[in-house]
Image: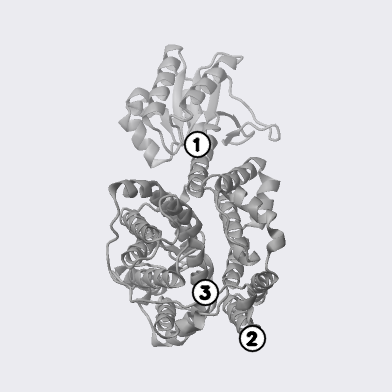
Amino acid sequence: MADSSKSSQPATANKAWPVFRSLANYRFGFLSRDLFAGLTLAAIVIPEQMATARLGGFAPQIGFFAFVAGSLAFAAFGSNRFLSSGADSTITPIFAGGLAALAATGSPDYATLAAALALMVGLMLAAAGIFRLGWIADLLSIPVTIGFLAGISAHILISQLPGILGLPGPEGPVLQRLATLAEHLGEANGFTIVIGLGVLAIVALSEKIDARIPGALIGLLLASAAVVLLHLENRGVSVLGSISVEKPALAIPVVSVGQLTSLLSLGLIISVVVMVQTAATTRSFPTDPNEPPDVNRDFFGVGIGSICAGLIGAFPVNASPPRTAVVSETGGRSQIAGLAAVAIVIALLAFGTALLHRIPNAALGGVLLFVALRIIRVGQIVAIFRQSLGEFLLILVTAAGIIVLPIEQGVGLGIALSLLHGIWTTTRARVQRFERVPDTSIWWPVSPKLPGEQVPGVIVVGLQAPLSFLNAYDFRRDILAALKSSPQKVRLLVLEATGIVEIDFTAAQVLTEIIGQCHDDGIDFAVARLESSRAQDAIVRFGITALLGLDRQFRSVEEAVRARAGKP
């Protein structure tokens, strides 16, 4: 008993902390581990945040600003002790595509709209955390999420090809840009190709050996050294050049009402994607394996990070599964690891931007190529293809929509497909007939592989789904068909209700009609194993209990059959 109370005490104390929750019960002995994890994280963050900023059409330092804002805010207001928040390559192509339709990439209006979008996304995420809307993260099914990631990967790959090939970036839709690049392959710069693919190879090899090896940083250092030693700038290799870093100023981005309206749908899409990825990250790396993750608190932490990013002129932030894994695998014990990485990034911005001058753009492209290839879930795609062809088609349609359509519309299509798939799954639920297992009191769905027995004049049916407007009319049709097909006069109809966890208004009206019709035809109607408290409340609220009577509600089918089969 004492052990149990001790184990629950840290969790209770942890939840009592309003800010810096990961520091509850912190011990000085954790500091060395956190500092090492922070150093490793910084080595990965520096090239990754620059590359992600470049992917979105921003200067490299804006990616650092996003990381600093996201990490500081999550450390203060989040719950998960490992989670790393900052610029993220999953959402960047989405909002970059949406913003490009409103303003020229890289222009002051583009930066202002990105900051406004960050504020909007942050407010939505903070509200989702406050009002405990964590269930929204479950709206995207795994196949749709995989298709979404595959489409995003294609966007990243195609967007980085011009930098890798040393060619000007073409305009237009994704497929048109790809065709334009194919036409000019003969003009590609061999040095940029070697740099891009070389960095990709170094990052991939480092990841395969040990995820803690900062392959991206190593690749960028070697590429920069090659630029200096071989004078590659004179051979057509473009570099970042001088980076002017001004101290970020707090300001609310000012946009017109029309622009704000245009950002709303994009903000909703980004918010849903961030919630899905944040929930997946915090569930994959729980603070306490014995306690459920506080997804809503983490939504709030990431949301405040986006708000802070918007106020300093950056863009929306997101939880990063790979960076979170690095903190966890290098022994990090709290958000001190993220704060240590923030300190290193701030020091780089203050004193070390000259070190970034010679980094070739092709090297950042190589980092992003690795990111793009990593987010494709090849193993899961193969498994779904083998196990569920219909859901494999969902992957293809979602990925194709994101690639062919404007990216924010493609993501919206993916979300719609996920919801439609869930609705379709619910509507597929049909009424099942039940039989008694011989020599037992167990009633089981009819199966050609299992022998069963019927009771003359008794029909037992069940539905393994919530009873709602989506399936209520099929439910009625199936029950009436079962009554009509019975070779004997039916005296008792038992509804086995284990799977009915909810009953809505439409379904209640249909169920009332079925009960009334059974009574008119001289058929007794009973309900067995209605275990869901929500469904129990529903039949009381909608008057079904009064219509049935308490003597027609039972805890088992056998009890119902024995009690009512011989009664009028």
* Nearest the eye: 400 or 31: 400
Q: Secondary structure at mark 2?
A: helix
Q: Secondary structure at mark 3?
A: loop
**Residue 202 position in % (x across, y down):** 66, 75
Residue 487's place in the image compared with 42, above or below, is: above
Side of 39 where 133 appears, left or right = left
* Residue behind mark 2: 229
**Residue 187 position in % (x across, y down):** 69, 62
Rendering quarter of residue 127: bottom left
* Residue behind mark 3: 240
Residue flagged by tag 1: what amino acid is it?
Answer: Ile
Q: Nearer the viewer, mark 1 or mark 3?
A: 3
Side of 163 where 37 appears, left or right = left
* Residue behind mark 1: 423
- The CA distance from mark 3 to mark 2 is 17 Å
- Residue 452 shows up from this direction: yes
- The CA distance from mark 1 to mark 3 is 49 Å
